[in-house]
Amino acid sequence: MRTSADNADNTVEAPSPSESQALPRILSLQFKQQQAMRYGENPHQSAAFYSQPHAALGGLGYYQQLQGKELSFNNLADADAAWLCVRSFDALGSPACVIVKHANPCGVALAGSALGAYEKAFQTDPTSAFGGILAFNTEIDEDCALAISQQFAEVILAPGYTDKALNVFAKKTNLRLLKIPMGTEAGLTQGLDLKRVTGGLLVQTPDWNRLKAEELQCVTQKTPSEQQLKDLLFAWKVATWVKSNAIVFCKDSMTMGVGAGQMSRLDSARIASIKAGHAGLSLQGTVVASDAFFPFRDGLDVVADAGATAVIQPGGSVRDDELIAAANERGLAMVFTGVRHFRH
């Protein structure tokens, strides 16, 4: 981690894609229909699921459904959001659980077991977790299955299940149980991210968060402790998969409050703290990730008032100096990443 003394210029310039990332002038794509659906996002819309004929890419296109009702359009959309998020934690070597509702992670946690990760993720927002999509980066055992069976879940994704776990889930005949290969990081970071627009297609390379501690720049008088640094990196990874504007409170490798998809970053900060209160969680001593820079100090004041002690954000605002001064005034440690992670 670098300090502000290592770089007097706090202005962050966006990196340019390398020549190897150049996109073709003519793009030809081929997909194979894997599943016809009863309807799309809403009952009046027709829909089908298509997969790419490249198994090496891994991902949701290669799931195996072990039980449960037919997957819906919205099930698959949310399942993909959950899988992308949980898959990003594989390199950390800890069991991870992600709970997604309406395309946003409402609970994310790491622990020493699948059960521990699930219990921590569920605590973040039990209300939103009802009817959610659960994804794991590790095999689900009987203890974890028993805990999950106490709530209503729509879909569970994992690379594997023990026989005893399958026996537990078999009693919930409507629960959609998916076995999905982890895939390699290379497979998941290759390919293209596609977004349909009227009369055309937006195409980009995937957004994959590989940030390391040594790449952070500390810009405040206080520097993060070792535990804060660990939680800041965790929060930053979660924020990658939360719809913008994203504000994520975390502590001890667990989300404590998530503000997602608001038109104002200030409102996202407020909502995250309100939701933590509704879940009975204290934000004292938490860290906060913001997927893009704070345009004004008001958002920073909201997270400080809620109890946060450290912040991770891209930097790059014309008001960075004001934000740094505000962080010092509030006794916060703040680090810049130099990279933003908008998700629309």
Image (cartoon, helix red, strand yellow):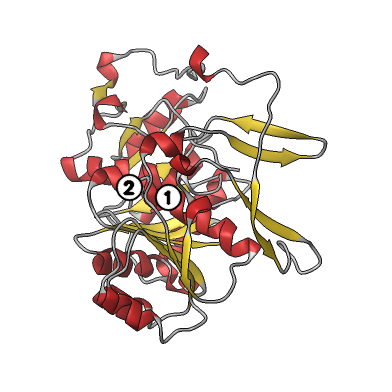
Per the rendering, the mark at residue 85 is 1
Q: Is residue 36 left or right of residue 298?
A: right
Q: Residue at x 36, y 71 (%)?
A: 280
The front one of 317 and 324 is 317
* Amino acid beneath label 1: Cys
Using the rendered image of the protein, determine whether residue 118 is visible from the camera's viewpoint. Answer: yes
Q: Are marks 2 and 1 in contact (CB under 8 Å)?
A: yes
Above/below status of 289 relative to 28: below
Q: Quadrant of the C terminus?
A: top right
Most extreme residue toward the bottom is 171
Using the rendered image of the protein, determine whether residue 147 is visible from the camera's viewpoint. Answer: no
Count of marks overlaid on the render? 2
Q: CA distance from mark 2 to mark 1?
A: 7 Å
Query: How packed is label 2: few (under 14 Cα within 10 Å), some, or many (20 or more)?
Result: many
**SS under mark 2:** loop
The front one of 90 and 241 is 90
Above/below status of 13 relative to 198: above
Q: Quadrant of the N terminus?
A: top left
* Amino acid beneath label 2: Phe
Q: Residue at x 44, y 28 (%)?
A: 339
Q: Residue at x 59, y 56 (%)?
A: 77
Q: Position of residue 249 (x, y in %)?
A: 38, 52
Q: Position of residue 27 (x, y in %)?
A: 68, 26
Above/below status of 205 relative to 276: above
Per the rendering, the mark at residue 48 is none
* Residue for badge 2: 89
Q: Position of residue 51 (x, y in %)?
A: 59, 48
Q: Position of residue 321 (x, y in %)?
A: 42, 23
